[in-house]
Amino acid sequence: MGDKLLPLVTRHFLIQPQNVDKLWEEEWSVTLRDDADKKVGRFHFEEAGIDGEVTLLLDIEPAYQKPSLGAEIYSAIASFVFKFQELKVVRTSCRHEDDDLVHSLEKAGYVRRKNSDGRDFYSITKQKTSWTGLYMILGLVAGLIIGITISNLWVGTISGIIIGTVIGYLIDKKA
């Protein structure tokens, strides 16, 4: 599946692994999109797939550590990782004093989980779909139709809530 998604192309960068067959073990390179020979960073994954989590270790050249550019890289990597159904969390860490990297992570949607020995530990979690309202509306409409059919709107409303919950569970369990 990974080779169909690669390379990762962002607004400014081209992100690709050294070996497509070993996405989780090999080092990846971050190059400029306009100049693929100009390497601006590298990263690799650790502990991929253990309990649905993967640890990301990224090293970017100081000239490209601006929050907007760093967020672009971190977002692209998280989007790629979340395309694999078994992975649900991306973890990383940085020095607490590194303001640009901290802002990059926060801008990309990573949340600080803890601080230990001068390092901040961040993670981003794969979001469930946000279609709950649609599921409930579909369920209520189906339930009201059932309620009108059997001339009992209370039973229809209750069955609609149950139907909406079941639809939501069945669709969201794939995410």
Image (cartoon, helix red, strand yellow):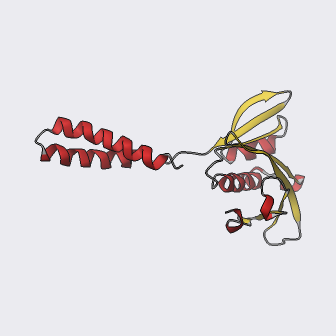
Q: Where is residue 113 drawn, in percent x and y?
A: 70, 32
Left or right placement of residue 140 versus residue 90 in this view? left
Q: With respect to residue 137, does 114 lie above or below?
A: above
Q: With respect to residue 5, does 83 lie above or below?
A: above
Q: Where is residue 108 drawn, in percent x and y?
A: 68, 48
Most extreme residue toward the left, as rendered? 151
Q: How many marks?
A: 0
Residue positioned 48% across, 47% down in the render: 172
Left or right placement of residue 68 versus residue 43 in this view? left
Q: Where is residue 122 drawn, in percent x and y?
A: 73, 38
Q: Where is residue 130 drawn, in percent x and y?
A: 47, 47
Q: Nearer the viewer, residue 106 or 15?
A: 15
Left or right placement of residue 78 versus residue 137 in this view? right
Determine if residue 75 is in view: yes
Q: With respect to residue 156, does 114 lie above or below?
A: above
Determine if residue 131 is in view: no
Q: With respect to residue 39, does 43 lie above or below?
A: above
Residue positioned 13% across, 47% down in the render: 149
Q: Nearer the viewer, residue 19 or 28?
A: 19
Q: Quadrant of the N terminus?
A: bottom right
Residue positioned 76% across, 35% down in the render: 121
